[in-house]
Amino acid sequence: MNRPPPVPKLGIGLLYQEQLRPFIERERDCFDFLELIPDVMWADMGYEQSPRFVENQEGIGFIRRVHAEMPVILHSIGFSIGSAHRFDREHIEQIARWYDWLKFPWHSDHLAFMFAEHMDGEINAGVTLPLPYDEESLDLLAPRIAEMRARVPVPFLLENNVYFFKYAGQDFDEPTFLNRLCQMSGSRLLLDLHNLYTNCRNHSTDPYEFLDQLDLRNVLEIHVAGGLEMEGFYFDAHSGISPPEVWQLLEWTLPRCPNLGGVTFEMLGSWFVDVGTEGLRAQLSRMKEAWLRHKPAPQATPTTVVATATTAEAHA
Amino acid sequence: MSQRTFQAMLGRMVVDLEFRRCVREQGDAALDADLTPLERERLLAAAADRGMDATRMVHKDFRLSKLYYMLPLTRFLLGSERLSREVSAFWSRNLPVSHYFIQESIDFCEHLQRRLLSGGLRVKYLREIVAYERAELELKLPRPGNDAPPPPQLVHFRYDPTILFTQLTQRRRPRAVPRLDCALRATLNPDDGQIQWQLHEGHPDAKAKAPSKAAPRTRKAKALRAHR
């Protein structure tokens, strides 16, 4: 396997939201890097339109000021890497342009598709729809990841997705699919522990079994978040602080990811009113304590995952 | 090739409730021919799966949040029941195409303005409020390749906007707002991206026809600024 050099150990990240600007400006000691969904800094005029991306200069000015003090990592949403009807090379070029000025040590996207063909155009489902864990999906993704990696010379991570229904007759289970994807394409993983918790809660499966099977050497970043229950489902709503089960997963996972570069907290800006400055500070502080307690080693070692106990209680 | 068709069918089931109902009721017959047996099985299972309801909830939340965020006064005036009805009618004719909030919100304003004009929708003051919020969005709309500031937007009011906005700012349903024919003029300050509103008493058409008349009294519309 062609393993790139390790990424720097950045520490704790906070996902940018416009409503968090005052917090980001005043509370820089609470986090080590800013994660940014770059798509919020431009208006996408549509695939194959010219010009395609109209950038928000005021927003970019804010990011420049933050970037003068800490790394800014991109976590994109508009690529839709899994869309079978088109491959968005224009998006890759846009990420490459942003790499030129941000020089982020890695960047990421979602393992999903949002855009699908519809009559003469396309629709945006507004939700990351799952790809079947099949050979066919690997064949679709691998060359696309290769192009991204060739154009943007830092590790490219894909995030494990939330899904509310499962496809029948898949070639692989999810961790095996992710392992194979990394092996085939050289991509790395953004392990979203709240997504994992959401899936396991909705489908009554064991997150630790998933983690036991996953090659955690591929995990370069972890996401944590909060969610909510509605209509019999638990949603990855980014609605406040993380639930206890996600903290347990983080404590278990952190020491087992030798190549980890950072742990990022995601929260929608509209929930800041409820969480408050103190609440957000406490969330980030707890993440930092966990990060420092486990002191992730600077270089890869063979995964220490042991496939024995299978319940959350056993691992906690 | 069938991978494309599979994704198209799945995506359509998420955004188009009617199509999903067809798949549930008609089964295989509702699906395109260009699918493998396994893809058919998966689509039929997804159509019947409660998880598809949850997926649609996320989709609706994403789409509705655009309108909530962009049109706060319009949604307040409409109220939740009427908003839900109008959004359903709008969505049935307009599929989601973008991540971005502004164009979809403008399109929804267009839908409401048509409904108001036709008499199909009657909500006092809504004509003014929709036009007001649409004007702000028109000014904020990205204008690729054009560095010049967008042209000003003029909104005609039949009621005193200062009193109307004061009541709305206090989260009250407007009542007994005195009649006042006037226009609000909005411009975008290119330096800070802020929108500035000025209140002009007198009908805009009258002013255009008689510019030599005493200049319309312009005053700072404090309530307008306060609500934003």
Image (cartoon, rainbow, N blue to C red):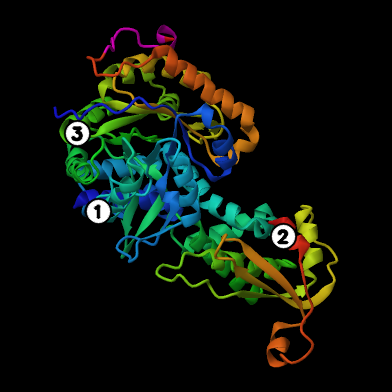
Residue A243 in sight here: no
In the picture, which quadrant includes the N terminus of chain A? top left
Q: Which amino acid does label 1 sit on?
A: Arg
Residue holding disc 3: A186
Chain ID of residue with mark 2? B
Q: In which quarter of the image is residue A105?
A: top left
In the picture, which quadrant includes the C terminus of chain A? top left
Q: Are marks 3 and 2 on the same chain?
A: no
Position in image of residue A229 (x %, y %): 54, 31
Region in magenta:
A304-315
Q: In this view, does B56 lie above or below A55?
A: above
Q: In this view, does A161 lie above or below A82?
A: above
* Residue at 43% in and 12% down: A293
Dots 3, 2 in contact, CB < 8 A: no
Give the camera-side residue of B32 and A221: A221
Q: In this view, does A231 lie above or below B94?
A: above
